[in-house]
Amino acid sequence: MANDIKIGIIGGSGLYQMAGLTETEEIEVETPFGKPSDTYHIGTLEGKRVAFLARHNRNHTISPSELNFRANIYGFKSLGVEWILSASAVGSLKEEIRPLDIVLPDQFYDRTKTRISTFFNEGIVVHVSFAHPVCSQLADVIELGAKDSGIQVKRGGTYVCMEGPQFSTIAESNTYRRNGADLIGMTNLQEAKLAREAEICYTTIALVTDYDCWHPDHDAVTVTTVIENLRKNNGNGQKILRAAVKRLPVDRTCKCGHALSHAIMTDLSKVPGKTLAKVELLLRKYV
Protein backbone atom coordinates (compact mmCIF):
# COMPACT_ATOMS: atom_id res chain seq x y z
CA MET A 1 0.00 0.00 0.00
CA ALA A 2 1.28 3.47 -0.85
CA ASN A 3 2.70 5.26 2.17
CA ASP A 4 3.65 8.61 0.64
CA ILE A 5 0.09 9.93 1.06
CA LYS A 6 0.13 12.03 4.22
CA ILE A 7 -2.99 14.14 3.61
CA GLY A 8 -6.56 12.87 3.63
CA ILE A 9 -9.72 14.79 2.75
CA ILE A 10 -13.24 13.65 3.61
CA GLY A 11 -15.96 15.25 1.53
CA GLY A 12 -19.43 15.46 3.04
CA SER A 13 -22.85 16.15 1.55
CA GLY A 14 -22.43 17.95 -1.76
CA LEU A 15 -18.66 17.44 -1.90
CA TYR A 16 -18.20 14.20 -3.78
CA GLN A 17 -14.99 15.01 -5.64
CA MET A 18 -12.02 17.31 -5.12
CA ALA A 19 -11.49 20.01 -7.73
CA GLY A 20 -7.93 20.37 -8.91
CA LEU A 21 -6.91 16.79 -8.12
CA THR A 22 -4.62 15.59 -10.93
CA GLU A 23 -2.75 12.39 -11.79
CA THR A 24 -5.63 10.53 -10.19
CA GLU A 25 -6.25 6.88 -9.54
CA GLU A 26 -8.86 5.05 -7.50
CA ILE A 27 -7.76 2.62 -4.81
CA GLU A 28 -10.12 0.16 -3.20
CA VAL A 29 -8.98 -0.50 0.36
CA GLU A 30 -9.94 -3.59 2.31
CA THR A 31 -9.94 -3.27 6.09
CA PRO A 32 -10.52 -5.65 9.03
CA PHE A 33 -13.59 -3.53 9.77
CA GLY A 34 -15.27 -3.87 6.41
CA LYS A 35 -15.55 -1.63 3.37
CA PRO A 36 -15.04 2.15 3.40
CA SER A 37 -17.73 4.40 1.96
CA ASP A 38 -16.13 4.47 -1.48
CA THR A 39 -12.82 4.00 -3.24
CA TYR A 40 -10.11 6.48 -2.27
CA HIS A 41 -9.30 8.97 -5.01
CA ILE A 42 -5.54 9.36 -4.94
CA GLY A 43 -3.94 12.26 -6.75
CA THR A 44 -1.85 15.38 -6.63
CA LEU A 45 -3.24 18.62 -5.19
CA GLU A 46 -1.06 21.72 -4.88
CA GLY A 47 1.95 19.49 -5.45
CA LYS A 48 1.08 17.12 -2.58
CA ARG A 49 -0.14 13.54 -2.67
CA VAL A 50 -3.69 13.43 -1.31
CA ALA A 51 -6.35 10.80 -0.65
CA PHE A 52 -9.96 11.92 -1.05
CA LEU A 53 -12.97 9.98 0.21
CA ALA A 54 -16.66 10.79 -0.34
CA ARG A 55 -18.13 10.17 3.13
CA HIS A 56 -21.60 9.18 1.94
CA ASN A 57 -20.34 7.57 -1.30
CA ARG A 58 -20.07 9.53 -4.54
CA ASN A 59 -23.75 8.75 -5.21
CA HIS A 60 -24.81 9.71 -1.66
CA THR A 61 -26.18 6.26 -0.91
CA ILE A 62 -25.04 5.92 2.74
CA SER A 63 -27.03 7.41 5.60
CA PRO A 64 -25.13 8.93 8.57
CA SER A 65 -26.20 6.05 10.82
CA GLU A 66 -25.00 3.50 8.25
CA LEU A 67 -21.51 4.92 7.79
CA ASN A 68 -18.65 2.54 8.47
CA PHE A 69 -16.53 5.11 10.28
CA ARG A 70 -13.96 2.55 11.36
CA ALA A 71 -13.29 1.36 7.83
CA ASN A 72 -13.06 4.94 6.53
CA ILE A 73 -10.45 6.03 9.08
CA TYR A 74 -8.55 2.73 9.01
CA GLY A 75 -8.34 3.06 5.23
CA PHE A 76 -6.68 6.45 5.55
CA LYS A 77 -4.27 5.04 8.14
CA SER A 78 -3.32 2.18 5.83
CA LEU A 79 -2.48 4.71 3.12
CA GLY A 80 -0.07 6.51 5.46
CA VAL A 81 -2.27 9.56 6.14
CA GLU A 82 -1.26 11.80 9.07
CA TRP A 83 -3.71 14.69 8.55
CA ILE A 84 -7.44 14.48 7.80
CA LEU A 85 -9.35 17.57 6.73
CA SER A 86 -13.05 16.81 7.03
CA ALA A 87 -15.64 19.00 5.29
CA SER A 88 -19.23 18.72 6.53
CA ALA A 89 -22.62 20.37 6.18
CA VAL A 90 -23.98 21.61 9.51
CA GLY A 91 -26.87 23.57 10.93
CA SER A 92 -26.36 26.70 13.03
CA LEU A 93 -27.64 26.95 16.60
CA LYS A 94 -26.74 30.63 17.02
CA GLU A 95 -28.05 33.76 15.32
CA GLU A 96 -24.55 35.09 14.68
CA ILE A 97 -23.48 31.93 12.83
CA ARG A 98 -25.28 32.41 9.55
CA PRO A 99 -25.99 30.11 6.63
CA LEU A 100 -22.98 30.08 4.27
CA ASP A 101 -20.56 30.76 7.15
CA ILE A 102 -17.61 28.40 7.61
CA VAL A 103 -16.63 27.33 11.12
CA LEU A 104 -13.77 25.34 12.62
CA PRO A 105 -15.36 23.83 15.75
CA ASP A 106 -13.10 22.68 18.56
CA GLN A 107 -15.55 20.70 20.72
CA PHE A 108 -18.14 17.96 20.23
CA TYR A 109 -21.21 16.84 22.12
CA ASP A 110 -22.35 13.28 21.47
CA ARG A 111 -26.06 12.63 20.87
CA THR A 112 -25.59 9.48 18.78
CA LYS A 113 -27.05 6.15 19.90
CA THR A 114 -26.10 3.25 17.66
CA ARG A 115 -22.56 3.86 16.46
CA ILE A 116 -19.28 2.10 17.16
CA SER A 117 -16.71 4.77 18.01
CA THR A 118 -13.60 2.74 18.79
CA PHE A 119 -11.23 0.32 17.11
CA PHE A 120 -10.46 -1.33 20.42
CA ASN A 121 -12.75 -4.02 21.83
CA GLU A 122 -12.94 -7.82 21.78
CA GLY A 123 -10.23 -8.25 24.41
CA ILE A 124 -8.33 -4.96 24.34
CA VAL A 125 -9.14 -1.76 26.24
CA VAL A 126 -7.78 1.65 25.21
CA HIS A 127 -8.69 5.04 26.69
CA VAL A 128 -7.34 7.94 24.60
CA SER A 129 -7.46 11.54 25.77
CA PHE A 130 -10.31 13.36 24.05
CA ALA A 131 -10.66 16.56 26.06
CA HIS A 132 -9.50 18.46 22.99
CA PRO A 133 -11.08 16.45 20.18
CA VAL A 134 -9.65 18.24 17.16
CA CYS A 135 -6.04 18.99 16.31
CA SER A 136 -5.43 22.68 16.99
CA GLN A 137 -2.23 22.60 14.96
CA LEU A 138 -4.12 21.40 11.88
CA ALA A 139 -6.86 23.96 12.59
CA ASP A 140 -4.15 26.65 12.55
CA VAL A 141 -3.08 25.46 9.09
CA ILE A 142 -6.68 25.53 7.83
CA GLU A 143 -7.28 28.99 9.28
CA LEU A 144 -4.14 30.30 7.56
CA GLY A 145 -5.27 28.62 4.34
CA ALA A 146 -8.58 30.45 4.59
CA LYS A 147 -6.73 33.76 5.00
CA ASP A 148 -4.58 32.91 1.99
CA SER A 149 -7.81 32.45 0.03
CA GLY A 150 -9.42 35.65 1.32
CA ILE A 151 -12.18 33.66 3.00
CA GLN A 152 -13.31 34.33 6.54
CA VAL A 153 -13.72 31.41 8.91
CA LYS A 154 -14.95 31.40 12.48
CA ARG A 155 -12.67 29.57 14.87
CA GLY A 156 -14.02 27.51 17.75
CA GLY A 157 -17.41 26.30 18.93
CA THR A 158 -19.26 23.14 19.94
CA TYR A 159 -20.63 20.73 17.34
CA VAL A 160 -23.57 18.58 18.49
CA CYS A 161 -23.43 15.24 16.71
CA MET A 162 -26.96 13.85 16.49
CA GLU A 163 -28.01 10.40 15.32
CA GLY A 164 -30.21 11.37 12.37
CA PRO A 165 -31.08 10.80 9.64
CA GLN A 166 -34.07 12.93 10.64
CA PHE A 167 -33.44 16.59 11.43
CA SER A 168 -34.04 17.94 14.97
CA THR A 169 -37.29 18.62 16.73
CA ILE A 170 -37.75 22.19 17.95
CA ALA A 171 -37.44 20.97 21.55
CA GLU A 172 -34.10 19.30 20.79
CA SER A 173 -32.78 22.30 18.89
CA ASN A 174 -33.68 24.71 21.69
CA THR A 175 -32.15 22.41 24.31
CA TYR A 176 -28.84 22.40 22.48
CA ARG A 177 -29.01 26.17 22.24
CA ARG A 178 -29.60 26.53 25.98
CA ASN A 179 -26.61 24.29 26.58
CA GLY A 180 -24.45 26.70 24.60
CA ALA A 181 -23.83 24.60 21.49
CA ASP A 182 -23.03 26.32 18.20
CA LEU A 183 -23.49 23.78 15.39
CA ILE A 184 -25.34 20.56 14.73
CA GLY A 185 -24.48 17.75 12.35
CA MET A 186 -24.62 13.97 12.00
CA THR A 187 -21.15 12.65 11.22
CA ASN A 188 -18.00 14.23 12.60
CA LEU A 189 -17.75 12.97 16.17
CA GLN A 190 -17.02 9.34 15.28
CA GLU A 191 -14.44 10.44 12.73
CA ALA A 192 -12.68 12.57 15.35
CA LYS A 193 -12.65 9.77 17.94
CA LEU A 194 -11.34 7.17 15.53
CA ALA A 195 -8.76 9.52 14.03
CA ARG A 196 -7.42 10.12 17.55
CA GLU A 197 -7.17 6.37 18.14
CA ALA A 198 -5.39 6.04 14.79
CA GLU A 199 -3.01 8.86 15.83
CA ILE A 200 -4.09 11.00 12.88
CA CYS A 201 -4.52 14.78 13.17
CA TYR A 202 -8.17 15.66 12.46
CA THR A 203 -10.11 18.91 12.06
CA THR A 204 -13.64 19.65 10.86
CA ILE A 205 -14.41 22.35 8.30
CA ALA A 206 -18.09 23.01 9.01
CA LEU A 207 -20.10 24.49 6.13
CA VAL A 208 -23.25 26.09 7.54
CA THR A 209 -26.34 25.42 5.45
CA ASP A 210 -29.24 26.50 7.67
CA TYR A 211 -30.46 27.60 11.11
CA ASP A 212 -31.74 24.13 12.03
CA CYS A 213 -35.41 24.45 13.09
CA TRP A 214 -35.19 26.83 16.07
CA HIS A 215 -35.05 30.08 14.10
CA PRO A 216 -38.45 31.83 13.61
CA ASP A 217 -37.60 32.53 9.97
CA HIS A 218 -36.35 28.99 9.38
CA ASP A 219 -38.99 26.83 11.02
CA ALA A 220 -38.32 23.82 8.82
CA VAL A 221 -35.10 22.43 7.39
CA THR A 222 -35.49 20.95 3.93
CA VAL A 223 -33.04 19.02 1.82
CA THR A 224 -33.58 21.59 -0.94
CA THR A 225 -32.35 24.42 1.32
CA VAL A 226 -29.38 22.37 2.44
CA ILE A 227 -28.35 21.46 -1.10
CA GLU A 228 -28.71 25.03 -2.39
CA ASN A 229 -26.48 26.40 0.36
CA LEU A 230 -24.03 23.56 -0.02
CA ARG A 231 -23.58 24.43 -3.66
CA LYS A 232 -23.00 28.07 -2.76
CA ASN A 233 -20.48 27.17 -0.05
CA ASN A 234 -18.79 24.38 -1.95
CA GLY A 235 -16.46 26.69 -3.89
CA ASN A 236 -15.13 28.40 -0.78
CA GLY A 237 -14.75 25.09 1.00
CA GLN A 238 -12.66 23.71 -1.84
CA LYS A 239 -10.51 26.85 -1.93
CA ILE A 240 -9.78 26.49 1.79
CA LEU A 241 -8.96 22.81 1.41
CA ARG A 242 -6.52 23.51 -1.43
CA ALA A 243 -4.84 26.35 0.43
CA ALA A 244 -4.48 24.22 3.56
CA VAL A 245 -3.04 21.33 1.56
CA LYS A 246 -0.52 23.76 0.07
CA ARG A 247 0.71 24.57 3.60
CA LEU A 248 1.08 20.91 4.59
CA PRO A 249 3.08 19.03 5.72
CA VAL A 250 4.16 20.69 8.94
CA ASP A 251 6.18 19.31 11.84
CA ARG A 252 3.73 17.51 14.07
CA THR A 253 4.26 19.18 17.42
CA CYS A 254 0.76 18.20 18.60
CA LYS A 255 -0.03 15.13 20.71
CA CYS A 256 -2.09 13.39 18.04
CA GLY A 257 0.80 11.32 16.72
CA HIS A 258 1.35 9.52 20.01
CA ALA A 259 -2.19 9.44 21.40
CA LEU A 260 -1.90 5.73 22.26
CA SER A 261 1.38 5.99 24.15
CA HIS A 262 -0.30 6.14 27.57
CA ALA A 263 -3.76 4.89 26.61
CA ILE A 264 -3.42 1.11 26.30
CA MET A 265 -4.81 -0.51 29.45
CA THR A 266 -4.50 -4.17 28.44
CA ASP A 267 -1.24 -6.11 28.50
CA LEU A 268 -0.79 -6.72 24.77
CA SER A 269 0.53 -10.20 25.45
CA LYS A 270 -2.92 -11.03 26.84
CA VAL A 271 -4.88 -9.76 23.83
CA PRO A 272 -6.45 -12.51 21.68
CA GLY A 273 -4.47 -13.06 18.49
CA LYS A 274 -7.47 -12.40 16.25
CA THR A 275 -8.09 -9.05 17.93
CA LEU A 276 -4.44 -8.07 17.80
CA ALA A 277 -4.31 -8.85 14.10
CA LYS A 278 -7.23 -6.45 13.46
CA VAL A 279 -5.51 -3.52 15.17
CA GLU A 280 -1.87 -4.35 14.44
CA LEU A 281 -1.59 -1.42 12.03
CA LEU A 282 -2.62 0.97 14.82
CA LEU A 283 -0.42 -0.62 17.49
CA ARG A 284 2.61 -1.46 15.36
CA LYS A 285 5.03 0.86 17.18
CA TYR A 286 3.80 -0.33 20.59
CA VAL A 287 3.92 -4.09 20.02
Image (tube, rainbow, N blue to C red):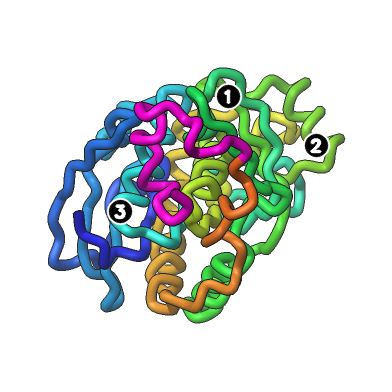
For label 2, the crowd category at 10 Å Cα-Cα, with few meaning under 14, some 14 to 19 and many 20 or more, is: some
Q: Nearer the viewer, mark 1 or mark 2?
A: 1
Q: Position of residue 171 (x, y in %)?
A: 78, 21
Q: Position of residue 208 (x, y in %)?
A: 57, 48
Q: Quadrant of the N terminus?
A: bottom left
Q: In which quadrant of the rendered view does residue 216 lie?
A: top right
Q: Position of residue 282 (x, y in %)?
A: 42, 47
61 lies above or below 189: above
239 lies above or below 117: below
- Left/right placement of residue 88 relative to residue 183 reads left
Residue 52: mark: 3
| Magenta residue span | 265-287
Q: Amino acid at mark 2?
A: Arg
Mark 3 or mark 1: whose residue is earlier in sequence: 3
Q: Amino acid at mark 3?
A: Phe
Mark-to-mark CA distance, 3 and 1: 24 Å
Mark 1 or mark 2: whose residue is earlier in sequence: 1
Residue 163: mark: 1
Q: In this figure, which residue is indicated by the disc labeled 2?
A: 177
Circles 1 and 2: CB distance less than 8 Å?
A: no
> In percent of the image, x 32 and y 59: which residue is there?
80
Which element type, helix, strand or loop, lies under badge 3? Answer: strand
Which element type, helix, strand or loop, lies under badge 1? Answer: loop
- Residue 282 magenta-highlighted: yes
272 lies above or below 159: above
> In percent of the image, x 70 and y 37: which residue is there?
109
Q: Amino acid at mark 1?
A: Glu
Q: In which quadrant of the rendered view does residue 154 lie?
A: bottom right
Q: Nearer the viewer, mark 3 or mark 2?
A: 3
